[in-house]
Amino acid sequence: MAQKILLGDEAVAQAALDAGISCAYSYPGTPSTEIMAYIQKHNPQQIRANWCPNEKVALEEALGVSYSGCRCLVSMKHVGLNVAADPFLNASLIKINGGLVLAVADDPGIHSSQNEQDSRIYAEFAQVICLEPTDLQQCYDLTRQAFELSEQNQMPVLLRLVTRLAHSRSGLELEGSIPIINTNHDSSRQDWVLIPKTSVRLNQELRHNYQALAVGQTEGNNNQTVATQQSLGIIASGIGVNYAQEACSSLGINPDLHMINFYPANLARIREFIDQHDQILIVEEGSPWLENKIRGLGRENEMIKGKIDGSLPPTGELNTEMLLSFLSEDSCQKSAGATNLKIKLPARPPQLCQGCSHRDVFRALQKVRANYDSVRIFGDIGCYALGYAPPFELIDTIVCMGASIGMAKGAADATSCKTIAVIGDSTFLHTGMQALLDAAKHQANILVCILNNSTTAMTGGQPLHLDGEQLPKLVLALGVEQEHLLLEEALPSRVDELAELLTLELEYKGVSVLIANRPCIQIARGR
């Protein structure tokens, strides 16, 4: 076997390449971005590996690959799965042909996201297999296994990563790669056309197969139990297995451990494990999803410890120290087992790069707001979200990708006052266009500032699907009037001029759009 040092994201990418994928699709988003970046850089067979306008498009293209009998990897962050939810939930009904794997990276602790939602819940909602790696080696091994499971069970497989795994680095054992796979199976129309007649049958088959998976698949090598007949039993999933093992090793204790990295979990085996112990600790990263299921097995809740009863923190990332706090019988044992370092580090809030074009637009908006104190500014997801923080303190709302324009329209509809939306070029193409189409249709009283820095800057500078010359044509095609489309260069020397132009458009009753152009300073520097 070959050995290689890789990030968790890179291990997933390498495994997909080694598993014979034909295509890979993604929309950038931390902590999943490095998956596609690695495939594009290490692509000896020159497979198609594309950034897509959004996650919905990425998954739909992957479905076309699977329909054609080839394997495909789709990668996204957890909130990206919200965007792809429509095809994802319907894809569970059809009979997958070529293996289809969704690598979804959750962000416990909200390092770079809006929330810390748990993608395992989506997998159960869709009734598809979910694999949750324990360590970086499993990031590789389970990705390869996921393609086989997808083809065997004719369903998409969701591979759930978390930030700490995605961005950790370790040496891995790699298996040999296989040629690009084409199953050469014809996809039946009866299994791919979701109309009521076929969907009723496919839904019944899906429910039956999903229930069978909990009993059949988990009796293999995925979910394992290490039993030593102790009074305390630990049920741990994913990276929680690592935290549990490290804490127990530090304290010199050896409780029984039931490890889970395959869902649907076999609840009968979990019930047997619980019956053998006086107390159970449940260790899982994310929501207490597994804990809720275990508490529903009818055992005394007093013996079940986890996030719900406060034994472990209900939000944020887990770590070994949290488990030490629970597992230690007294402070002496705790101090003997591990050193508890409490170092208060100075805050280092993020800020826009010096020379960033967004700064010039925000300075202009500050001048505008000085004269229009009641105007509301709706923000979006991207570097420009930092307009919320000092020194600008302009943005009033940030909710999700593309929400700024729709929320600005809604507020204008409700108040009859002019509102402002601030959105980046990539986010506008992701899910902002539809809201502008609606605003133009109804002549909403809004001013939209599209910050065009010619890249998806926040995630590393991925290319856009339109260049600077095409973007104004798109805005006009969506229904914005030519005389209220401003194309301006964002420069420090033009802040006052920009402020004057924005002020004039605030007096106009209808849709105005400013496209503020200047390349990202990091891209301009060649980074």
Image (tube, rainbow, N blue to C red):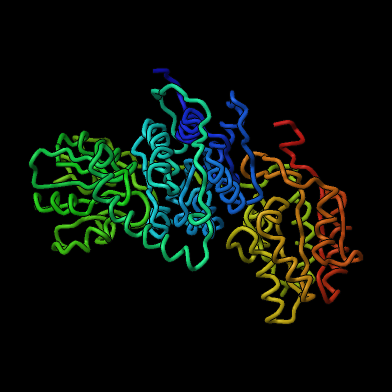
Tell whether 500 sits left or right of 395: right
- Within the image, what quadrant is residue 399 found in? bottom right
Q: Residue furthest top?
A: 2
**Quick check: can you spot residue 381?**
yes
Task: State the image coordinates of residue 213 (x, y, percent, origin top left).
Answer: 30, 50
**Quick check: can you spot residue 7?**
no
Tell whether 462 sits left or right of 178: right
Q: Is residue 247 above or below residue 417?
A: above
Q: Quadrant of the N terminus?
A: top left
Tell whether 391 sits left or right of 477: left
- Within the image, what quadrant is residue 45 found in? top right
Task: State the image coordinates of residue 344 (x, y, percent, origin top left).
Answer: 42, 44
| Residue depicted at x 31% and y 43% | 261
Task: State the image coordinates of residue 61 (x, y, percent, origin top left).
Answer: 60, 47
| Residue depicted at x 40% and y 54% | 123
- Within the image, what quadrant is residue 409 found in? bottom right
| Residue depicted at x 68% and y 62% | 394
Q: Nearer the viewer, residue 236 or 457?
A: 236
Task: State the image coordinates of residue 105 (x, y, percent, origin top left).
Answer: 47, 45
Tell whether 17 sits left or right of 138: right
Q: Quadrant of the C terminus?
A: top right
| Residue depicted at x 53% and y 29% | 180
Q: Nearer the viewer, residue 461 or 490?
A: 461
